[in-house]
Image (cartoon, rainbow, N blue to C red):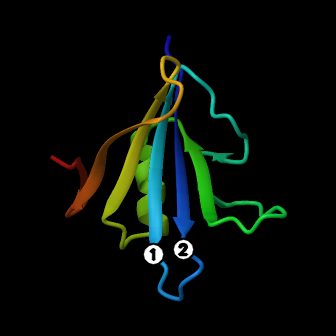
Amino acid sequence: MAYQTFRVEITRDETRDDGQVRIEITAYIDRMPETNEATLGRLSRTWRGVWNSRLQYTGDFETLAEALAAIAAAYPEADRIRCYEYSVDNEFPVEVAPLLRSGEKWLPAT
């Protein structure tokens, strides 16, 4: 059976007052995420270390539907999510089509 987890990362450009929120989902396929900072099943505020990170929230989810529901609850105004796949066959995450909001649904950009 294949292992899969969806990591959501939400960043914000804190160098500007109107800094936009950027949302990304990475699908880890048959590999574990390299860091364990994310909570399972929910978005949580990230720990700030010595460096001032732009990473605001993160979370790991078992399904894409759970990840999208958490994003919608935290950022109902979000309309675009950058997406990546990171499989055991790849050295780095591969960017795939972003998800765009269409009403209440998220659809891949064409």
Say whether disc 2 or disc 1 marks the residue closer to the N-terminus: 2
43 relative to 85 in the view: left or right? right
Q: Residue 100: percent from the left, percent from the top?
A: 25, 57
Q: In the rendered view, would you say 43 is above or below 74?
A: above
Which of the two residues, 64 or 16, is positioned nearer the viewer here? Answer: 16
Dot label at residue 70: none
Above or below: residue 25 compared with residue 94 = below
Which residue position is annotated with label 2? 13
**How far across and down, in percent of the image, does residue 18 sit?**
47, 86
Q: Residue at x 15, y 46 (%)?
A: 110
Q: Secondary structure at mark 2?
A: loop
Q: Residue at x 53, y 61 (%)?
A: 10
Q: Which amino acid lies under the numbered mark 2 shown in the image of this protein?
A: Asp
Q: Kindly give the residue lying farthest to the right in the view shown.
A: 50
Residue at image point 47% right, 70% down: 21
Q: Left or right: 73 with respect to 55?
A: left
Query: Residue 32: x, y in percent?
Result: 63, 27
Q: Position of residue 51 (x, y in %)?
A: 78, 64
Which residue has dot 1 on it?
Answer: 20
Q: Is residue 75 above or below residue 42?
A: below
Report, in whole angstroms, how far the alpha carbon at label 2 lies from the one at label 1.
6 Å
What is the quadrant of residue 48 in the picture? bottom right
**The image quarter in which residue 33 lies:** top right
In contact (CB < 8 Å): disc 2 and disc 1:
yes
Q: Nearer the viewer, residue 104 or 17?
A: 17
| View extreme (top): residue | 1
